Amino acid sequence: MIKNKTLLVLFRLVLGGLFVYAGVVKALDPLDFAQNIRNYDIVGQSLSFIAAVVLPWLEILAGLALAAGVWKRASALVISGLLVFFIVLTLVTIVRGLDVDCGCFGAFGREAGLGVILEDLGMLYLGLCILLAPKKRSR
Amino acid sequence: MSDARRIIRQALTIGVLSVLVAAAVHFPLVNRFVRGEFRETFFSRADYPGIRLITLQEAEDLWAAGETVFFDARGAGPYGEGHVPRARNLPEAESRQMLPADVLKLLRERALVVYCEGGDCQSSLLLAKRLHDEGFKDIRVMTGGWEEWKKAGLPEDRGDDQE
């Protein structure tokens, strides 16, 4: 468990910033992102659309809250939950042998593979450090 | 224990707020979805392995190389007002009757790029799916469409369809 406050603030800024960025590039082109989701061949047309509209804003709001230090643990919980979901999704995609753009960072997306999982695991580590950081004493 | 509850409640609030903000920001899109659009727009890679979405830069490179056939999926009116040079006009609604069989056969071996107006237009994707069903194996959809092409100051032609 990391106790260093400066390090935790840095983690919040990095992770929050990454999520805001990832959310903004997706929110700019929700239909393109919907196609990305559809490529995973897990959900149908309508759910792809709904997820493509909502998910970027979940990333943006959770990222903003985390970076700003508002509801730190709650936003870290949302982000960690999303990361666990992305990791499982990527694993399933690899096992199914699908060649799919991960859709992670808009134009900077790449194939959903081991690299993406490692990246997500790195971010999950930051998220869990924030989520499980010792509570500050009230006095 | 109450701490955990508070965190979960806040996390759920973030979720609810995201839905509300998303619905507000993308209201025009959501409205179109509620009216029945986007139910056939997105395709499964397994069903349509020959279709790829491309950026303006990729489309420009393909156009400059001159090997790829461009199709404009808009109607004859907007096409006449301006289109990608050498692009054929193939309005999505008429795409079944527009191309004679010998042309289809000739083009089957070549890569195609399809586009429509841009923004959230759907006809290029629908045309791409239709062409895929016709047997075309390499179809790229320029998602930015004519709007993006024109905005970038790339070459344009006016007037009727040309061979």
Image: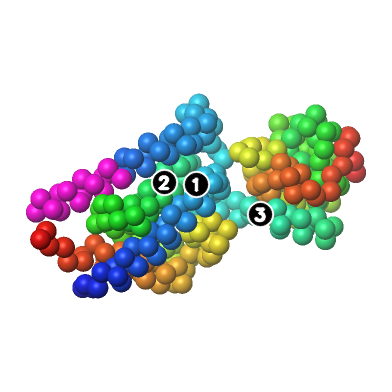
Task: Provide residue B126's location: percent of width, then percent of height.
Answer: 64, 39
Element on which disc 3 rests = strand
Residue stretch in magenta: B1-14
Task: Provide residue B84's location: percent of width, then percent of height.
Answer: 81, 45
The secondary structure making up most of the magenta span is: helix
Instruction: Give the numbered dot on residue A57.
Output: 2
The chain identifier of the residue carrying mark 2 reads A
Do the dots labelled 3 and 1 sit on one chain? no
Image point (43%, 39%), residue name: B22
- Left or right? Give the position of A39 relative to A43: right
Image point (48%, 64%), residue name: A112
Furthest residue to the top? B35
- Tag 3–tag 2 contact (CB < 8 Å): no
Which of pointers 2 and 1 lies earlier in the amino acid sequence? 1
Instruction: Give the numbered dot on residue A27.
Output: 1
- CA–CA distance in space, label 3 to label 2: 24 Å
- Tag 2–tag 1 contact (CB < 8 Å): yes
Task: Provide residue A13's location: percent of width, then percent of height.
Answer: 37, 62
Residue holding disc 3: B54
